Amino acid sequence: MTTAHGVVDTPAFMPVGTQATVKSLTPEQIRACGAQIILGNTYHLYLRPGHETIKKMGGLHTFMNWPGPILTDSGGFQVYSLGKLRKITDDGVIFQSHIDGSKHLLTPKKALEIQEALGSDIMMCLDECTPYPATYAETQKSLALTTQWAKLCKEAKTDSHQALFGIVQGGTYLDLRRRAVEEILPLNFDGYALGGVSVGEPKEIMYAIAETATPLLPEDKPRYLMGVGTPDDIVYGVSCGIDMFDCVMPTRSARHGLLFTNSEKIVIKNARFREDDAPIDETCDCYTCRNFSRAYLRHLYIAGEILAMVLNTIHNVHYYMRLLEQIRAALEKDSFTQFQNTFMKKEGGV
Amino acid sequence: MTTAHGVVDTPAFMPVGTQATVKSLTPEQIRACGAQIILGNTYHLYLRPGHETIKKMGGLHTFMNWPGPILTDSGGFQVYSLGKLRKITDDGVIFQSHIDGSKHLLTPKKALEIQEALGSDIMMCLDECTPYPATYAETQKSLALTTQWAKLCKEAKTDSHQALFGIVQGGTYLDLRRRAVEEILPLNFDGYALGGVSVGEPKEIMYAIAETATPLLPEDKPRYLMGVGTPDDIVYGVSCGIDMFDCVMPTRSARHGLLFTNSEKIVIKNARFREDDAPIDETCDCYTCRNFSRAYLRHLYIAGEILAMVLNTIHNVHYYMRLLEQIRAALEKDSFTQFQNTFMKKEGGV
């Protein structure tokens, strides 16, 4: 995938850099983990420090000193997550800031305006994230709004260097997912995302959605499964044809001391690591595993040290990046199915 | 100054690595700031993860992956800071852990045992940090205890690779400071420290102590002003003949968004930096100043991001290290007095 700020190998995983920082990491550390593209959250950056400020400071890349590609979401999902603090109308979403309670209106046009000010490489259309559960009628109505907003986003786009992706909603109803694809494809976006997944629905349903909708999307454009997911979700997503993923899982888990390894998930505060001088994962070559023991990481975590967050995040992001590398290598060698079988067996996944 | 883990240029400043980490920094970042030696806190490491654990993990250097020299304090100062949670007897200090309330006895022998288990390059004698204010009689009594404990520490020392420093107490009474020097010099320590300063006394008194006691200590052994201090304190200390300093000021200030520059101290959350695309200090070549704007650092700080702590700490530690470099260069060129005059004028210091 080629963007204004460089090429991205796909399938790709995007570490989440909510507030213009992948929490706890310097840009060099993010890069050293193998990340090629990161995600920024429009909702957070709009509220603080403000997209106009970021624009004046040279755009998001310059502001956070990340020279590589950035995808920004539309802000819709975060606003949706505000619950009672937001109200959806045909024009957009009225919401209250989680920071100071101030009222704001996010429209399709505004979502594009903010993302253009941020200067991301890939922008997302404002959509309505259909909640789970939702009735068929509710989902139909929600989908109609998403389609209408997609058209308005397409019209609002002015900058030619920034790509714009459309979003496929349709809740848990596979026929509505198909309809969403039919409605959105004629708008000719630069890529397509599956939204409204990973919002509480059973994993089987998410998998069914990915399985159904992905093949309907053009193969020559990136296909992005939003907010997903666990390592086995990613492997499954790739098997459906997904090219892009993002999730707070590696970074958030790291801050909670939950570390991914090739054989198990480790809770680093566990007493069994008290005098364990092995690295988190013997097979991992990340900075953390090359230099620090489980005993040290446990100590840092229990002592509440900031360095615990840093070192754990480096490891988890690196784990995800290595997983994607392995997936790309398997695809290259035409041995992905074999890789998937081995991986799922190991993970005890679906 | 030569230690078991390498040479240290003096005068030297030691960033504080309380819990086996200079808060928020990786060892590479500490080194890149120019630090050659760091300080570890015996009290904290004894309680968590425990000196025996660190010993089993290969000692403090291996545990925290810092290959350079480390000085450990005796634990005395932290215990002293516990206030009502500690009681001083002739044998040592009985104290309650700030973590779990458990009771412990720290004796001169125990202080050495812990520091030998940690494997630091420089160990400190257990002393009684005379409070401020204290009467002459109280200070006399306290000094007698420190001298007695110094003898016991000297006797308890077993490892030949680790240096042991004696500590000069005597409170604010200059004649007791002189007596302290007389009592401690015959014990022939590898270096000498001035303790019981920076405990609330007026700066003029601290300066008078440094001025009086430092010249009485042998020039061919390191002279260390404990827990000091501000940039102008350090410049003043060097003018008295001090070779070593430590202080949480650069690291703690950084975490509170107070940044040192060549011309002023900056409170990074200040609104005037909202759209300031300049680095913290135009004359600084630290990683933070080379890569990030005040506007970005303000944003990170206000957003409560971990990266704010990391980047601010890098800058402040680098500022201190550069100050010491400038001091050493001035001493080398025999122009320290001129440097001091220029510096004090700029700082508006004493």
Image (cartoon, coloured by chain):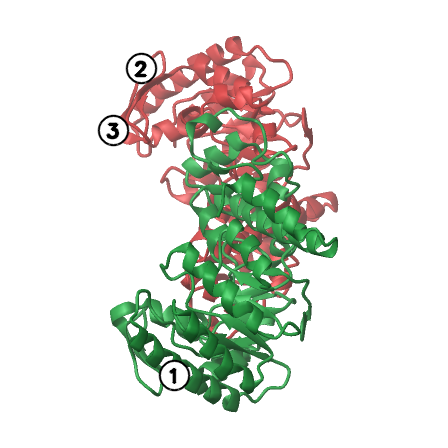
Chain colours: A green, B red
User: Quarter-wise, where is residue B240 in the image?
Assistant: top right
Mark 1 belongs to which amino acid?
A: Ala
The lab-note entry on whether marks 2 and 3 share a chain reads: yes
Mark 3 — residue? B84
Comparing marks 2 and 3, which lies closer to the viewer?
3
Asked if the residues shown at circle 2 and circle 1 are in contact, with their CB atoms under 8 angstroms apart, the answer is no
Asked if the residues shown at circle 1 and circle 3 are in contact, with their CB atoms under 8 angstroms apart, the answer is no
Disc assigned to residue A323: none
The reply to whether residue B61 is in sight is yes
Mark 1 — residue? A144
Position in image of residue B33 (x %, y %): 63, 48
Position in image of residue A303 (x %, y %): 42, 36
Mark 2 — residue? B89
CA gap between label 2 and label 1 equals 79 Å
The reply to whether residue B337 is in sight is no
Figure check: B250 above or below A292: below
Which of the pair A324/A303 is nearer the observer?
A: A324
Farthest-out residue, bottom: A155
Estimate how packed mark 3 is, as few (under 14), some (14 to 19) or many (20 or more) residues with alpha carbons within 10 Å: few
Comparing marks 2 and 1, which lies closer to the viewer?
1
Residue at the image position 49 percent from the left and 15 percent from the top: B113
CA gap between label 1 and label 3 equals 68 Å
Figure check: A46 above or below B245: below
Estimate how packed mark 1 is, as few (under 14), some (14 to 19) or many (20 or more) residues with alpha carbons within 10 Å: some
CA gap between label 2 and label 3 equals 14 Å
Which of the pair B302/B233 is nearer the observer?
A: B302
Which of the pair A79/A148 is nearer the observer?
A: A148
Mark 2 belongs to which amino acid?
A: Thr
Q: Earlier in the sequence, mark 2 or mark 3?
A: 3
Mark 3 belongs to which amino acid?
A: Lys
Figure check: B126 above or below B290: above
Estimate how packed mark 2 is, as few (under 14), some (14 to 19) or many (20 or more) residues with alpha carbons within 10 Å: few
